[in-house]
Image: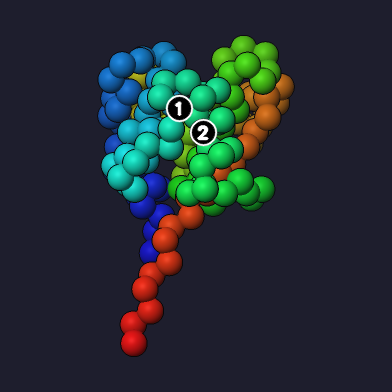
Amino acid sequence: MDNPIYTTGKKYLGKDIAKTENELGCAEAVNFVCKEAIGQEAGGGLSTTKIYQSLLTDKRFKRVNTPEKGDIIISPTGYGIGYGHTGIVSDSGKIMSNNSRTFLWDEHLSVGEWWLKYKTFPIVLFRYQFPAEPAII
């Protein structure tokens, strides 16, 4: 079974899902995808700093070291040089995020490009902890 955060993110590729922000709409877009996929935003509103702080304390999300489809990747503003960014890990080494040039949700960065572009920031991955399926007896 594919991760619903991943499949929802894929469904919105090429669309403007950050309705309030354009150039700086990454947190808004990630929250939109999470709300559609799991019924609740990841938190933090429009701010990568606040979404990061929310993810650190939210028991629904676990900090992980290896990226998997559907994980939230974040390099929060205020922890490095320039503006931070957030997105969702896709397949084939890509990351889905709001594109600051086109204002559309797309796969314009690879995981490797992310590491190079945001190397002055912490680069943190969070995985949603899906509730366990009830046992069928």
Q: Can residue 90 be seen in this view?
A: yes
Sequence-wise first label, 2 or 1: 1
Could you tell me the amino acid type at mark 2?
Answer: Ser
Q: In which quarter of the image is the C terminus?
A: bottom left
Please give the label number shown on residue 44. Answer: 1
At 33% from the left edge and 33% from the top edge, which residue is drawn? 32
**136, above or below 109, in the image:** below
Asked if residue 75 lies left or right of residue 13, the reply is right
Please give the label number shown on residue 76. Answer: none
Q: x, y percentage for residue 67?
A: 58, 48
At 53% from the left edge and 37% from the top edge, which residue is drawn? 55
Q: x, y percentage for residue 100?
A: 43, 17
The residue that disc 2 covers is 54
Asked if residue 50 lies left or right of residue 117, the reply is left
Could you tell me the amino acid type at mark 1?
Answer: Gly
**42, above or below 16, in the image:** below
Q: x, y percentage for residue 119?
A: 70, 26
Residue at the extreme right of the image, as rendered: 120
CA–CA distance between discs 2 and 1?
Answer: 6 Å
At 38% from the left edge and 79% from the top edge, which residue is drawn? 135
Residue toward you, 78 or 86: 78
Given contact means CB atoms under 8 Å apart, are the residues at marks 2 and 1 in contact?
yes
Residue toward you, 73 or 63: 63
